[in-house]
């Protein structure tokens, strides 16, 4: 038995359904504008509902600017959005008004995650900053979210320690004391420091701003900041 291209002739509707659905799973990310998921066809040959899963169809959404629409013609009054949808739109608009706070929080997380994972001796000798503590309060400037602490994957942790932290130290070298500058030059040498400054400040294909690892970490930190600042919306 097949349930495909189902029509609703008795209701005089031109709507048709390509197949019956047994399961739906979607994920929406309002920060990245990504909407994806999957639809699973119903397999009528299986008697048990838990086993009637057939072909899986992947779904990918498009990044668009959401705007609630209302009717502009006709005599019927404009439709009203459901209270739950209105509350979500209000939250997103509120977030839009606080994008500066979101960027500021993300930048703070990126600095704290670097301090957390960088070489301990370099942090103590060249920054004078303590290792950030783990916490859950987005308004606490001294805390780092648990996702960016010891739970962070090995690859970004190694990159932060071996590349990003060293480039950060080089970029701020002129702001440090003569004693700290001597320590840094002794550790890395003048030529390497010049290359680090190019990596940190410029926009070439091998620079920080174009680094896939930095972009992924930045996106991850932005998602975490979003969830902390607007906990009513889960991503």
Image (cartoon, rainbow, N blue to C red):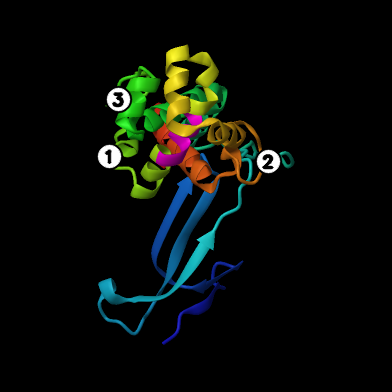
Crowd band around label 3 with a 10 angstrom C-alpha radius: few (<14), some (14–19), many (20+)? some
State the residue at coordinates (25%, 77%): 48
Q: What is the x, y in percent for residue 90?
A: 51, 28
Q: Earlier in the sequence, mark 2 or mark 1?
A: 2
Report whether residue 186 is seen.
Answer: yes
Q: Secondary structure at mark 1?
A: loop
> In this image, 18 relative to 232: left or right?
right
Q: Secondary structure at mark 3?
A: loop
Q: What is the x, y in percent for residue 53?
A: 35, 74
User: Which residue occupies the extreme top position in the image?
Assistant: 177
Report which residue position mark 1 lands on. 150
| Residue 167 inside the magenta-drawn segment | yes
Report which residue position mark 2 lands on. 71
Q: Secondary structure at mark 2?
A: loop
> In this image, 150 relative to 187: left or right?
left
Can you tell which mark lies on residue 131?
Answer: 3
State the residue at coordinates (32%, 38%): 147
Q: Is residue 225 above or below residue 156?
A: above
Crowd band around label 2 with a 10 angstrom C-alpha radius: few (<14), some (14–19), many (20+)? few
Instruction: Report, in whole angstroms, how far the alpha carbon at label 2 lies from the one at label 1.
Output: 52 Å
């Amino acid at each position: 038995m097949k349930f495909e291209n189902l029509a609703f002739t008795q209701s005089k509707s031109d709507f048709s359904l390509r197949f019956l659905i047994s399961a739906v799973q979607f994920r929406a990310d309002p920060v990245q504008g990504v909407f994806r998921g999957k639809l699973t066809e119903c397999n009528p040959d299986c008697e048990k509902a838990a086993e009637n899963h057939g072909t899986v169809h992947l779904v990918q959404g498009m990044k668009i600017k959401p705007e609630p629409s209302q009717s502009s013609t006709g005599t019927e009054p404009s439709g009203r959005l459901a209270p739950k949808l209105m509350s979500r739109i209000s939250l997103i608009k509120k977030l839009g008004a606080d994008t500066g706070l979101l960027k500021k929080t993300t930048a703070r997380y990126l600095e704290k995650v670097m301090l957390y994972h960088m070489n301990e001796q370099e942090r103590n000798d060249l920054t004078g900053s303590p290792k950030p503590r783990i916490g859950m309060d987005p308004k606490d400037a001294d805390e780092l979210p648990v996702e960016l602490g010891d739970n962070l994957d090995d690859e970004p942790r190694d990159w932060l320690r071996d590349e990003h932290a060293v480039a950060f130290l080089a970029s701020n070298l002129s702001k440090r004391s003569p004693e700290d500058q001597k320590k840094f030059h002794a550790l890395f040498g003048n030529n390497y420091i010049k290359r680090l400054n190019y990596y940190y400040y410029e926009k070439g294909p091998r620079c920080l701003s174009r680094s896939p690892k930095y972009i992924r970490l930045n996106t991850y930190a932005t998602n975490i900041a979003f969830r902390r600042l607007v906990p009513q919306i889960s991503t």
